[in-house]
Image: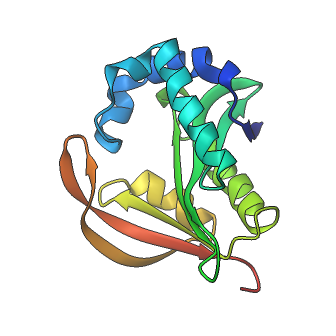
């Protein structure tokens, strides 16, 4: 059963293991990663930055679990308050657990948290044009396509186009 829980410094070692084991699988979908992220100290530094951003209200980072085993991460970032009440969503699951509904379940849980506990109005997510699996995760969770962003993010070393999806809070 898929669960999510807040990211902690104690997650550095298992996350380093998962990232290292999935380096090639995740490479086409992510920015070029600093090799330091494959190490426990590198993960610890990255987690410290996320926790600092969380303390400032900018980010909410969770690990994705299957039977208490870390299999990925789901993060709300760029949280903006005031009249916007919006954020960006990012998520990944390792190859061995991919295609088993974990990403969909994690996105459902983090969206519920965003709209209930955080009181956000809108969640935005972008996917590479060819990332049909990620688009399905979003669509299964009620996200709707709203645009195409040319050269939106630098992924795998080059600026790439993304399809943009959004989900508005129920009753919003």
Count how many numbered circles sit on residues in the image: 0
Q: The N terminus lies in which quarter of the figure?
A: top right
Q: Position of residue 98 (x, y in %)?
A: 52, 36
Closer to us: 29 or 120? 120
Q: Which residue sits at x=31%, y=41%? A: 31
The residue at the far left in this view is 158
Q: How is the image coloured?
A: rainbow
Question: Could you tell me if residue 165 is visible in this image?
Answer: yes
Quadrant in the rendering for residue 121: bottom right
Q: Position of residue 11 (x, y in %)?
A: 65, 22
Question: Could you tell me if residue 100 is visible in this image?
Answer: no
Q: Is residue 25 above or below residue 156?
A: above
Quadrant in the rendering for residue 120: bottom right
Q: Position of residue 148 (x, y in %)?
A: 31, 74
Closer to us: 139 or 13? 13
Q: Is residue 38 left or right of residue 45?
A: left
Closer to us: 24 or 82? 82
Q: Which residue sits at x=63%, y=83%? A: 83
The residue at the far right in this view is 117
Q: Is residue 51 above or below residue 41?
A: below
Closer to us: 137 or 88? 88
Q: Is residue 74 left or right of residue 92?
A: right
Q: Is residue 80 above or below residue 74?
A: below
Quadrant in the rendering for residue 64: top right
Q: The C terminus lies in which quarter of the figure?
A: bottom right
Q: Is residue 45 left or right of residue 9?
A: left
Q: Position of residue 158 (x, y in %)?
A: 17, 48
Q: Which residue sits at x=42%, y=23%? A: 37
């Amino acid at each position: 059963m898929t669960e999510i829980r807040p990211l902690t410094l104690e997650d550095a070692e298992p996350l380093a293991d998962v990232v290292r084991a999935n380096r090639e699988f995740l490479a086409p979908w992510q920015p070029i990663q600093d090799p330091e992220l494959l190490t426990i100290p590198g993960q610890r530094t990255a987690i410290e930055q996320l926790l600092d951003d969380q303390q400032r209200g900018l980010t909410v980072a969770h690990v994705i679990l299957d039977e208490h085993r870390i299999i990925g991460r789901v993060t709300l970032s760029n949280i903006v308050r005031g009249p916007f009440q919006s954020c960006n969503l990012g998520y990944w699951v390792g190859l061995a657990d991919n295609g088993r509904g974990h990403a969909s379940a994690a996105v459902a849980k983090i969206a519920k948290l965003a709209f209930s506990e955080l009181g956000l109005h809108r969640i935005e997510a972008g996917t590479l044009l060819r990332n049909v699996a990620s688009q399905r995760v979003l669509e299964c969770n009620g996200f709707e396509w709203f645009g195409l962003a040319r050269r939106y993010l630098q992924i795998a070393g080059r600026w790439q186009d993304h399809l943009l999806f959004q989900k508005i809070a129920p009753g919003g």
